[in-house]
Amino acid sequence: MKVKAVDYAHDGRGVVKTGKDLVFVPNLMIGEEAEITITSNKKNYSIGEVKNYLSLSKERVTPSCMYYQQCGGCQLQHMAYEHQLEMKQKRVSDALKHIAKLYVPVDDIIKSTSPFEYRNKIQMAFANSKTGLIAGFYQAKTKKVLNINTCLIEHEEGNQVIQTLKTLLDSYHVKAYDPITKKGWIKHAVIKKGIYTNELMLIIISQTEGFKKQPQIISALIQKHPNIKTIIHQVNPSIYKVIGNKDNIIFGDGFIHDTLGEFTFKIRPQSFYQVNPLQAKKLYDIALDLAQINKKDTVLDAYCGVGTISLFAAKKAKHVTGVELIEDAVSDANYNASLNHMDNVRFVCDDAETFMASNHAHFDIVIVDPPRDGLQLSFIEAIKVTKPKKVVYISCEPSSLARDLKELKTLFHVKKVVPVDMFSQTYHVESVTLLELK
């Protein structure tokens, strides 16, 4: 079947129209013509696969990563970076128009100064192969581990630590846990890095207890990578999440520090901390600039994590309340407030929706930074009842942002929307939206 892509789906796949039917085709760019085959049919669309390109976009580039065609981590490396930005900005604008029925100008997207090697967190899975232990990411839409020696969007030092760990474990004949045979030990390794402090945290996740040759492996890791400040072993048999709740600290204090702007933050394994701190600072600056906080304002920071936005807001506000569900993150947020000598901020361990619905406390400004699912309706209803003069909505998913703005626009004017490229080479896009009470 000969086709031409006319648009992009939310995840960067090319959209092809065949009569009334839509076909989503990976690795096909707007304007490109190709011969495709249909690989599967869904209720409202089909999925295609390129068999032969008939014409190529001038915006197409050769992916820098040798694993790109197999790995599921990046989706846009075949696009020139400026074209990625155009696609993401349009994604935000289209979501507002089609879902929220909002026809407001969307500012130019804030581009990244480092489209590669920007992530401060690496999470790799382990598996067994005929040649020994391998570590990497899952192949697209599978649970098969692709052996990866270096990831171009991760920090290089973290890549090197993973490779050292893999070599050491393999040399002591440590096997990866196999969910089919129920045998093996190592499951994942996670690296967190303080981009400005250069401090490294290594989290080793296994299926069971019994860290074989632990002293030798830890000693070799620290000797080769002196920036490692802490190593944590977690036993986590769960198949649903990688990071567990119980830390066995086998080296260091169990946490690292990083700085963002004028503040220093404590980071633990379970802490939410933006994976791209360079762009996060830009994101927070935009949010605070839009909020225009003054010394008379009380501020609520919902989904506050370790208190990053809260502390920046507290520099300008009368008082800030941060709400976060993860107990360790709240503990770290309180530590961060004390570390940075901020006494006009408090942190509450609670579900943001429950807190708003049950307290109905009035705040002059509400800052929200929810997960990809967006805000719960109970939270939105509580905002409508308490009527803050401004809401600053930091979103990592345009569709949930648009859904929530559809509910909020009855009471608030949507004044400004600024997309920010936090996750270059992927389809994900953040944005900051300012809402003002009518």
Image: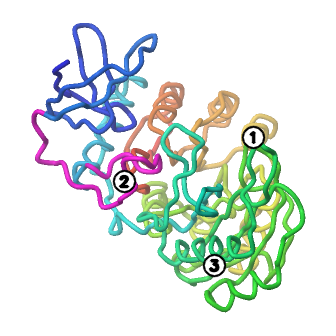
Alpha-carbon distance for marks 2 and 3? 24 Å
Q: Is residue 22 above or below residue 325?
A: above
Residue behind mark 2: 425
Question: Residue at point 16% right, 35% down?
Answer: 53
| Of marks 1 and 2, the one in the foreground | 1
What kind of element bears circle 2?
Answer: loop
Camera-near label (1 vs 3) is 1
Q: Which residue is mark 3?
A: 200
**Numbered tag placed on residue 180 in the rendering:** 1
Q: Amino acid at mark 2?
A: Gln
How many C-alpha atoms fall within 10 Å of the one at disc 3: few (<14), some, or many (≥20)? many
* Res 225 → quadrant: bottom right
Query: Residue 135, image x and y in percent?
Result: 59, 61
Question: Which residue is most to the top?
Answer: 20
Say left or right for 301 vs 334: left
Which amino acid, mark 1? Ile
Nearer to me, 169 or 194: 169
| Magenta segment boundaries in residue numbering | 54-78
Q: Is residue 157 above or below residue 421?
A: below
Q: Earlier in the sequence, mark 1 or mark 2?
A: 1
* For residue 428, side relative to residue 35 (left or right): right
Seen in the picture, residue 366 relative to 32 is either above or below; the reply is: below
In the figure, 262 relative to 247: above or below? below
* Picture coordinates of residue 334, whole percent (x, y): 78, 69
User: Mark 1 or mark 3, which has the lower sequence index?
Assistant: 1
